Amino acid sequence: MLQMTRFLLAILVVAGLAGSAAAADIRFKQIYFSADHMVPLITYNGETVAEDLENLKAVIDENVHCREECAPADGSPIAVVSLNGPGGNYSTGLDLAQYFRDNHIATIVERGNYCYSACAFAFLGGSAYSPQDGVGTYIDRVAEPGSIVGFHAPYIDDANLARYIEEKRTGEVMDNNRVNFAIMADELVRWNINPNIVGWMMFQGPDQTYNLLTPNDLYLTRSALPASPASSWITDKQDAVRNACLRLMAAFYSTQPELEDPFFPTEFTPNTGIGATGEPLSGFVLGNEPLRLGHCSVTQQSLATNGDFDIALYMTAGLDGRSLPLLSFFNRNKGWSTMGIGAEPTRRVFQKGSMNHMFLAPTANLDDLDGGANAFLNESRFIPAQDIDLPIIDANMTIESQDFNTETIRAGNVRAFIQTGSRELFDAALMEQTALGTNITHESVSGAGFIRSGTYEETGDPFSWFGFASGDSAAIIHIEKVGNDGQSWTGEEAALVRQIQCGTEFATITLNCAN
């Protein structure tokens, strides 16, 4: 099926002649994406064309030295790719999705960006990895409020269709079209899209898209809101439980959750029952027939938390007075959130951190709901309260890229990545689990700075990381060796690394290079 996919989808484009568009602009952006994803950020901007996969591989290989051997037990991708593009070649979109899945690369469409068609297919591959038993690869794809992720069926533009009909019989064209739609359905299911929405996605024509604009859309596509505590999105706990119950009911009956289900009660009832292990329950009464669905409830103990809820559909009480769960949802602000059991994480509703969209009204507008999380997200992204000057580096190096908070400089095989941000950037970098996948040969830490040097276990490549903290601002510098050849610094390179370490000044702070 995969070979057929590549053959038949090769001629499918969003607009224009196949191969006429320029490759997307793919580049390393910054050292750390966020406190929740302490991995490099790669940006992908532009139309999706065949060359994009190899270009992306080259950027990842050059800038991401630590792979799944560096993933902690609580899970992490090796990098985050921020997508922004109008679509393009479907075959490449599928290839990108598979590359993201195989290499545990998370995807995000950030506020103000859009990702249509082939780009949206690539988005579905966003993944991360945990060495923890029973986890392994799991889905990690985020659509921020204010972004657009849009899906539609593959199609051939007029110019290519006319040419294709000239070369093939009309019946053969129709046969191939049916196969293309079958392939799209198979691919969507493979990326864990809820079957209830696959038909609607395929119904969208060239000028139509199914966009991820509501919590319901995120639920159906197994996508996520930006990581933040559940309390930053929940305004009423009882409403939050009801919204989660709507998703549980939808999963139980294989339907879609609705905002106002006339058959679902609105009154939150205390003491709806006793769970299988004796825990008191409260929630929504659904019936009283023996051995049937009786209520959707939350444990009273978990309801008292800030979002670590245990919610389930329960049968009516048995002879022992206790209710057995039929379908459960466990939400954790720190840890794994999951609905149901069985299958690997990429095949069910499973996420690292709070599954916040589960608590929001299914058809609410996401763009109107993110106010409570803004402060947390800004802090998580290390966004400072005011502009911060980049560090002054006293070394003869060429600037490869630069913007307001990042800079990349290089001389020969020595490359330095610089990132500035809030004090949280320094604290997060200092606490990072550097023992995973690295051999630290030198480490010095103080309240105003730190330095760590060593090699990556997998490649043997040397590195030097150091950082500065001054008041509410911070700067982090990573010095890496380009080429992944496993060789130590040469004498000349080692001298340059030392010069960068000792000759960098941030807010009047320098490293102590006396020794």
Image (tube, helix red, strand yellow):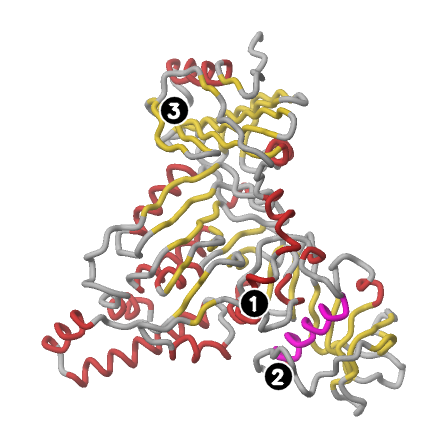
Q: Nearer the viewer, residue 405 or 247?
A: 405
Q: How would you rate the neighbour count of disc 2 (Cα within 10 Å): few for under 14, some for 14-19, many for 20 or more?
A: few
- What residue sits right under mark 1 in the picture? 365
Q: How would you rate the neighbour count of disc 1 (Cα within 10 Å): few for under 14, some for 14-19, many for 20 or more?
A: some
64 is higher (above) or lower (below) than 108: above
Q: Nearer the viewer, residue 119 or 311?
A: 119
The residue depicted at 66 percent of the width and 21 percent of the height is: 446
Amino acid type, label 1: Asn
| Residue 435 shows in this picture | no
Determine if the magenta segment contains residue 90.
Answer: no
Give the image location of residue 427, x and y in percent.
64, 33
Q: Are marks 2 and 1 in contact (CB under 8 Å)?
A: no
- Mark 2 secondary-structure assignment: helix
**Quadrant including the N terminus:** bottom left
For marks 3 and 1 on the same chain, the one whose residue lies earlier in the sequence: 1
The residue depicted at 55 percent of the width and 68 percent of the height is: 214
Q: Are marks 3 and 2 in contact (CB under 8 Å)?
A: no
Q: How would you rate the neighbour count of disc 3 (Cα within 10 Å): few for under 14, some for 14-19, many for 20 or more?
A: some
Q: Disc 3 and disc 1: Cα gap in Å?
A: 47 Å
In this rendering, which labeled residue sits more in front, label 3 or label 1?
1
- What residue sits right under mark 3 in the picture? 414
- What residue sits right under mark 2 in the picture? 253
Q: Which residues are magenta?
A: 237-251
